[in-house]
Image: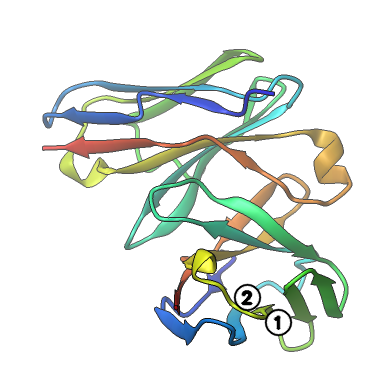
Protein backbone atom coordinates (compact mmCIF):
# COMPACT_ATOMS: atom_id res chain seq x y z
CA UNK A 1 0.00 0.00 0.00
CA UNK A 2 1.29 3.41 -0.92
CA UNK A 3 2.41 5.58 1.97
CA UNK A 4 2.93 9.29 2.22
CA UNK A 5 4.80 10.46 5.30
CA UNK A 6 4.88 13.93 6.82
CA UNK A 7 6.06 15.32 10.12
CA UNK A 8 2.91 16.23 12.04
CA UNK A 9 4.49 19.34 13.55
CA UNK A 10 3.60 21.89 14.58
CA UNK A 11 6.23 23.79 12.67
CA UNK A 12 6.54 27.23 14.21
CA UNK A 13 8.13 30.09 12.29
CA UNK A 14 8.12 33.87 12.84
CA UNK A 15 6.41 36.16 10.39
CA UNK A 16 8.62 36.88 7.38
CA UNK A 17 10.67 33.69 7.68
CA UNK A 18 10.84 30.78 5.26
CA UNK A 19 8.74 27.75 6.20
CA UNK A 20 9.95 24.39 4.88
CA UNK A 21 7.53 21.49 4.77
CA UNK A 22 8.67 18.00 3.82
CA UNK A 23 7.09 14.81 2.53
CA UNK A 24 8.36 11.36 1.55
CA UNK A 25 6.49 8.73 -0.42
CA UNK A 26 6.91 4.99 -0.80
CA UNK A 27 5.95 4.25 -4.41
CA UNK A 28 8.72 4.89 -6.93
CA UNK A 29 6.12 4.73 -9.68
CA UNK A 30 4.34 7.85 -8.47
CA UNK A 31 4.38 10.61 -11.04
CA UNK A 32 2.36 13.51 -9.69
CA UNK A 33 2.68 15.33 -6.39
CA UNK A 34 0.41 17.88 -4.78
CA UNK A 35 0.26 20.21 -1.83
CA UNK A 36 -3.11 21.00 -0.29
CA UNK A 37 -3.71 23.56 2.44
CA UNK A 38 -6.37 23.00 5.09
CA UNK A 39 -7.40 25.71 7.52
CA UNK A 40 -8.79 24.55 10.85
CA UNK A 41 -12.37 23.39 10.43
CA UNK A 42 -12.27 23.82 6.67
CA UNK A 43 -11.78 21.58 3.67
CA UNK A 44 -8.48 21.00 1.83
CA UNK A 45 -7.66 23.20 -1.16
CA UNK A 46 -4.99 22.69 -3.80
CA UNK A 47 -2.12 25.18 -3.75
CA UNK A 48 0.66 23.54 -5.78
CA UNK A 49 1.38 20.54 -7.98
CA UNK A 50 4.64 19.28 -9.47
CA UNK A 51 5.52 16.47 -11.88
CA UNK A 52 9.17 16.99 -12.81
CA UNK A 53 12.33 16.87 -10.74
CA UNK A 54 13.45 20.28 -9.60
CA UNK A 55 11.68 23.39 -8.42
CA UNK A 56 8.38 24.96 -9.33
CA UNK A 57 7.59 28.46 -8.12
CA UNK A 58 4.23 30.17 -7.73
CA UNK A 59 4.35 33.47 -5.90
CA UNK A 60 5.62 32.91 -2.37
CA UNK A 61 5.37 29.13 -2.77
CA UNK A 62 8.01 26.80 -4.20
CA UNK A 63 7.51 23.06 -4.60
CA UNK A 64 10.60 20.88 -4.87
CA UNK A 65 10.69 17.31 -6.15
CA UNK A 66 13.46 14.72 -5.97
CA UNK A 67 12.22 11.44 -7.40
CA UNK A 68 15.48 9.60 -6.74
CA UNK A 69 15.11 10.33 -3.02
CA UNK A 70 11.29 10.05 -3.15
CA UNK A 71 11.06 13.43 -1.51
CA UNK A 72 8.79 16.42 -2.02
CA UNK A 73 8.96 19.72 -0.21
CA UNK A 74 7.08 23.00 -0.04
CA UNK A 75 8.80 26.27 0.77
CA UNK A 76 6.79 29.29 1.82
CA UNK A 77 8.75 32.53 1.64
CA UNK A 78 7.88 35.61 3.68
CA UNK A 79 5.52 33.56 5.84
CA UNK A 80 2.39 35.35 7.04
CA UNK A 81 0.09 34.57 9.97
CA UNK A 82 -2.57 33.79 7.35
CA UNK A 83 -0.39 30.88 6.19
CA UNK A 84 -1.06 29.13 9.51
CA UNK A 85 -2.79 25.92 8.48
CA UNK A 86 -2.20 22.22 7.99
CA UNK A 87 -0.41 21.35 4.76
CA UNK A 88 -1.24 18.00 3.18
CA UNK A 89 1.09 16.27 0.75
CA UNK A 90 -0.66 14.05 -1.80
CA UNK A 91 0.58 11.58 -4.38
CA UNK A 92 -1.29 10.18 -7.37
CA UNK A 93 -2.52 6.61 -7.53
CA UNK A 94 -2.96 5.90 -11.19
CA UNK A 95 -4.98 8.55 -12.99
CA UNK A 96 -7.91 8.76 -10.67
CA UNK A 97 -7.11 9.04 -7.00
CA UNK A 98 -4.75 10.68 -4.53
CA UNK A 99 -3.16 9.30 -1.38
CA UNK A 100 -2.73 11.96 1.28
CA UNK A 101 -0.23 12.29 4.09
CA UNK A 102 -1.53 13.16 7.55
CA UNK A 103 -0.36 16.72 7.18
CA UNK A 104 2.02 19.15 8.87
CA UNK A 105 0.61 21.95 10.99
CA UNK A 106 2.29 25.30 10.35
CA UNK A 107 2.08 28.14 12.86
CA UNK A 108 3.31 31.57 11.82
CA UNK A 109 3.66 33.97 14.72
CA UNK A 110 3.37 37.76 14.24
CA UNK B 1 -20.54 28.54 -9.47
CA UNK B 2 -21.67 26.35 -6.60
CA UNK B 3 -19.05 24.08 -5.15
CA UNK B 4 -19.50 20.59 -3.74
CA UNK B 5 -22.41 20.64 -1.35
CA UNK B 6 -22.61 18.29 1.62
CA UNK B 7 -25.27 17.76 4.23
CA UNK B 8 -25.62 17.65 7.11
CA UNK B 9 -22.68 19.77 8.28
CA UNK B 10 -22.90 18.29 11.75
CA UNK B 11 -24.51 15.10 12.97
CA UNK B 12 -24.64 13.80 16.51
CA UNK B 13 -26.18 10.39 16.95
CA UNK B 14 -26.20 7.47 19.29
CA UNK B 15 -24.45 4.18 18.73
CA UNK B 16 -26.54 1.82 16.67
CA UNK B 17 -28.41 4.49 14.75
CA UNK B 18 -28.33 4.81 10.97
CA UNK B 19 -26.48 7.78 9.53
CA UNK B 20 -26.87 9.09 5.98
CA UNK B 21 -24.50 11.69 4.56
CA UNK B 22 -25.33 13.44 1.30
CA UNK B 23 -23.28 15.04 -1.43
CA UNK B 24 -23.97 17.07 -4.55
CA UNK B 25 -20.86 17.27 -6.76
CA UNK B 26 -19.93 20.15 -9.03
CA UNK B 27 -21.98 20.04 -12.21
CA UNK B 28 -20.04 18.42 -15.04
CA UNK B 29 -17.61 16.55 -12.82
CA UNK B 30 -17.55 12.83 -13.53
CA UNK B 31 -15.53 11.64 -10.54
CA UNK B 32 -16.86 11.63 -6.99
CA UNK B 33 -14.88 10.65 -3.92
CA UNK B 34 -15.76 10.00 -0.29
CA UNK B 35 -12.94 10.60 2.20
CA UNK B 36 -12.87 10.29 5.98
CA UNK B 37 -10.55 12.42 8.12
CA UNK B 38 -9.44 11.71 11.69
CA UNK B 39 -6.48 12.90 13.70
CA UNK B 40 -5.10 9.39 13.97
CA UNK B 41 -5.44 8.26 10.35
CA UNK B 42 -5.53 11.49 8.40
CA UNK B 43 -7.51 11.72 5.16
CA UNK B 44 -8.51 8.25 3.94
CA UNK B 45 -10.25 7.41 0.68
CA UNK B 46 -13.33 5.31 1.31
CA UNK B 47 -14.80 4.91 -2.18
CA UNK B 48 -14.90 6.67 -5.51
CA UNK B 49 -17.26 6.74 -8.46
CA UNK B 50 -16.72 7.46 -12.13
CA UNK B 51 -19.81 8.35 -14.15
CA UNK B 52 -21.98 7.17 -11.24
CA UNK B 53 -20.35 3.71 -11.15
CA UNK B 54 -18.39 2.64 -8.05
CA UNK B 55 -14.81 1.98 -9.13
CA UNK B 56 -12.96 1.19 -5.93
CA UNK B 57 -14.54 0.61 -2.53
CA UNK B 58 -11.53 -1.07 -0.94
CA UNK B 59 -11.29 1.77 1.57
CA UNK B 60 -14.75 1.16 3.00
CA UNK B 61 -13.97 -0.07 6.52
CA UNK B 62 -16.62 -2.74 6.79
CA UNK B 63 -20.05 -3.83 5.70
CA UNK B 64 -21.70 -1.26 7.91
CA UNK B 65 -20.67 1.32 5.32
CA UNK B 66 -22.36 1.66 1.96
CA UNK B 67 -22.37 4.32 -0.75
CA UNK B 68 -24.57 5.00 -3.73
CA UNK B 69 -24.64 7.41 -6.62
CA UNK B 70 -28.04 7.13 -8.28
CA UNK B 71 -27.35 10.01 -10.68
CA UNK B 72 -24.65 12.48 -11.65
CA UNK B 73 -25.77 15.08 -9.13
CA UNK B 74 -26.24 13.09 -5.94
CA UNK B 75 -24.43 10.58 -3.75
CA UNK B 76 -24.99 9.15 -0.30
CA UNK B 77 -22.77 7.49 2.26
CA UNK B 78 -24.65 5.41 4.78
CA UNK B 79 -23.47 3.90 8.05
CA UNK B 80 -25.72 1.31 9.63
CA UNK B 81 -25.35 0.67 12.51
CA UNK B 82 -23.08 3.49 13.59
CA UNK B 83 -20.35 3.06 16.22
CA UNK B 84 -18.31 5.59 18.25
CA UNK B 85 -15.20 4.76 16.20
CA UNK B 86 -17.00 6.10 13.12
CA UNK B 87 -16.75 9.62 14.57
CA UNK B 88 -14.84 11.69 12.01
CA UNK B 89 -15.22 14.37 9.37
CA UNK B 90 -16.49 12.90 6.12
CA UNK B 91 -15.56 14.79 2.98
CA UNK B 92 -17.06 14.46 -0.45
CA UNK B 93 -14.93 15.65 -3.36
CA UNK B 94 -15.40 15.79 -7.10
CA UNK B 95 -13.21 16.27 -10.14
CA UNK B 96 -13.36 16.08 -13.90
CA UNK B 97 -11.73 13.44 -16.09
CA UNK B 98 -10.29 16.21 -18.19
CA UNK B 99 -8.65 17.66 -15.11
CA UNK B 100 -7.05 14.40 -14.14
CA UNK B 101 -5.83 13.62 -17.61
CA UNK B 102 -4.26 17.03 -17.52
CA UNK B 103 -2.80 15.81 -14.23
CA UNK B 104 -3.66 18.85 -12.18
CA UNK B 105 -4.85 16.47 -9.49
CA UNK B 106 -7.33 19.01 -8.24
CA UNK B 107 -10.03 17.57 -6.10
CA UNK B 108 -12.77 19.99 -5.12
CA UNK B 109 -13.85 19.26 -1.58
CA UNK B 110 -17.12 19.99 0.12
CA UNK B 111 -17.21 21.58 3.55
CA UNK B 112 -17.44 18.16 5.19
CA UNK B 113 -19.89 16.45 7.51
CA UNK B 114 -18.70 16.19 11.09
CA UNK B 115 -20.12 13.00 12.60
CA UNK B 116 -20.14 12.29 16.31
CA UNK B 117 -21.41 8.91 17.48
CA UNK B 118 -22.05 8.72 21.21
Q: Residues within 10 Å of mark 2 (few under 14, many from 20)?
A: some
Marking on residue A80: none
Q: Is residue B100 visible?
A: yes
What element does badge 2 sit on?
Answer: loop
- Residue drawn where x is 74% and y is 50% of the image: B105
B75 in relation to A56, above or below: above
In this rendering, would B115 be left or right of B27?
A: left
Residue plotted at (67% across, 25% down):
B26
User: Pointer 2 indicates a residue of which chain?
Assistant: A
Quadrant location, the C terminus of chain A: bottom left
Residue at position x 70%, y 82% in the image = A70
Q: Is residue A101 visible?
A: no
Q: Residue furthest top?
A: B71
Q: Is residue B28 above or below residue B71?
A: below
Residue B19 coordinates in the image, percent (x, y): 28, 23
Q: Which residue is mark 2?
A: A26
- The reply, left or right, for residue A24 in relation to residue B95 is left
Q: Quadrant of residue B95?
A: top right
| Circle 2/circle 1 CB separation < 8 Å | yes
The residue that mark 1 highlights is A70
State which chain disc 1 sits on.
Answer: A
Between the residue at mark 2 and the residue at mark 1, the CA separation in whole angstroms equals 7 Å
For the residue labelled by badge 1, is the local secondary structure a helix, a strand or a loop?
loop
Amino acid sequence: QKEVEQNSGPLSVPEGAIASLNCTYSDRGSQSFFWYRQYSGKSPELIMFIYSNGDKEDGRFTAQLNKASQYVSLLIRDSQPSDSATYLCAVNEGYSTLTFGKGTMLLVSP
Amino acid sequence: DAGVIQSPRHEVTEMGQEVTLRCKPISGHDYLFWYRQTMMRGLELLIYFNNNVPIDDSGMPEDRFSAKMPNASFSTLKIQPSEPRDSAVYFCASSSRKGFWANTGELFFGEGSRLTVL
